[in-house]
Amino acid sequence: MSPTPCALIGLLALSAAVVAQETNSPPLRLHPENPHYLLFRGKPTVLITSGEHYGAVLNLDFDYVPYLNELQSKTLNLTRTFSGTYREIPGSFGITDNTLAPKRYCSPWAQAGEKFDLAKWNDAYFARLKDFVAQASNRGVVVEYVLFCPFYEENLWDANPMNPKNNVNNTPDCPRTEVYTLKHDALLRIHDAFARKVVTELNAFDNVYFEICNEPYFGGVTLEWQAHISQTIVDAEKGLPNKHLIAQNIANGGQKIEKPNPLVSIFNFHYATPPNTVAENYRLNKVLSDDETGFRGKDDVLYRTEAWDFLIGGGAIYSNLDYSFTPGHPAGDLRDYKSPGGGSAELRSQLKILKEFVNGFDFVHMSPKNDIVKGGSITAPLAGSPAQVHGTVRVLGQDGKAYAIYIYGGTQAELKLALPAGAYKAEWLNTKTGKIDKAEEFGHAGGVRAIGSPAYSEDIALRVASN
């Protein structure tokens, strides 16, 4: 499919509505038995993806159907897209063919000659948006729709429709660090109108949740403004059939949340490795998300291991920036990019293995159980003899029934696990191939049991389940 022509606006809007009705399911929500996880179309759900750099809708040269087909082929079930209230320019952040820096920009606001009219909507944008969400819905892909993003640099504010030089509405001539605050009523009215419009347009879809603002800890975005926008979303849906989850981006790395916004169900962190923020915030009984990573280099191992660490550590969402997706390569097959992060078909296949591993458990009834590890060793051969090396072990478990264990580091491990009495089966999973490299069954009288891994490289996963 080529980018949506304006002539198809009515047809695409109808298509989106039909798809939304056919799902016959309430929107994505917190799982009622364990709100650390999600419920989607009747099934317990974790969301895992390696997706394009957020320009699928606002970039008219990005063909999102091959992109969504590629996600579906790897059973990845999330995409993150920016609304178009923010865009980048060629060269931003050193990203090759950045989808978020469109040559042909599809703005949610209508053009008024060479400028924008922030009091009028661009119908073609909303037709394209709804078709994108409908196409994602058909493939079981959830859309995280990001309403706003701060302006990291002056040149990004200079290119934005809300900058007074780019619109006919006489918006306040304020610093970029004051745009997402409560200081300027005229801008706040524009933000509120946009949030209400989007929430209304997407209300019929079950595969959407709304993030208030990407990385609000940059560019002067205030907590009071974020609370205001979250309330605007809730108020907009009061008279509508469906209610959608709201996400808030908290920090890069991690941060203990002291005063959570009660309207927020998903707390997003970026570059959350190691996943200490999961333990710090598990008490909130909400979904914790590693919502963006991808500036660590090009090697797949960096992102595979971060994803495993976060999910087995108790998180429920992992979203990787995948720079192999560009307007010229919408199926994600660009290999010689110079972007600051990674992404490849191989990585996406490895994330599929993680998703299938997690889905092989009754994870809704599991929680972090690192305390069952009572010792052991993680080693690597050195000069013909084993040498102790640094490594980490994460455990997600349900006592006496099943344990998902992830080891990062070394090339061989022995774990001493405190297990209740019972009969068990242990399977060591190769995180790169998906094959079981070693399996054993054993009876256990209770107490500590030693379980040894096969040889591996970089990382390995272990499933221990009652037999």
Image (tube, helix red, strand yellow):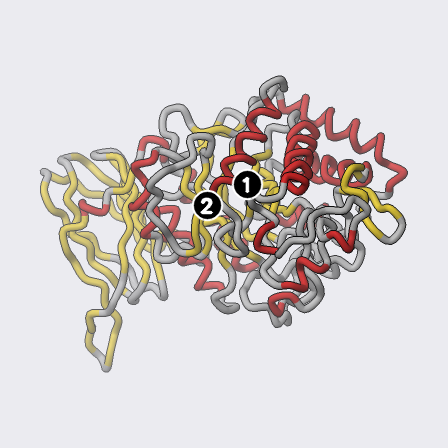
Question: In the rendered structure, which amino acid carries the disc numbered 2?
Answer: Asn
Q: Please give the label number shown on residue 211.
A: 1
Q: Secondary structure at mark 2?
A: strand
* Percent position of residue 181, x then y: 56, 45
Mark 2 crowd level (few <14, some 14–19, many ≥20, 10 Å Cα): many
Q: Secondary structure at mark 1?
A: strand
Q: Earlier in the sequence, mark 1 or mark 2?
A: 1
> On the image, numbered disc 2 is attached to which residue?
268
Report whether 192 appears left or right of 76: right
* Percent position of residue 193, x then y: 68, 34
Q: CA distance from mark 1 to mark 2?
A: 9 Å
Q: Which quarter shows the C terminus?
A: top left
Q: Name the residue located 25 percent from the left edge and 67 percent from the top edge.
A: 390
In contact (CB < 8 Å): disc 1 and disc 2: yes
- Displayed quadrant of residue 265: top left
- Displayed quadrant of residue 419: top left
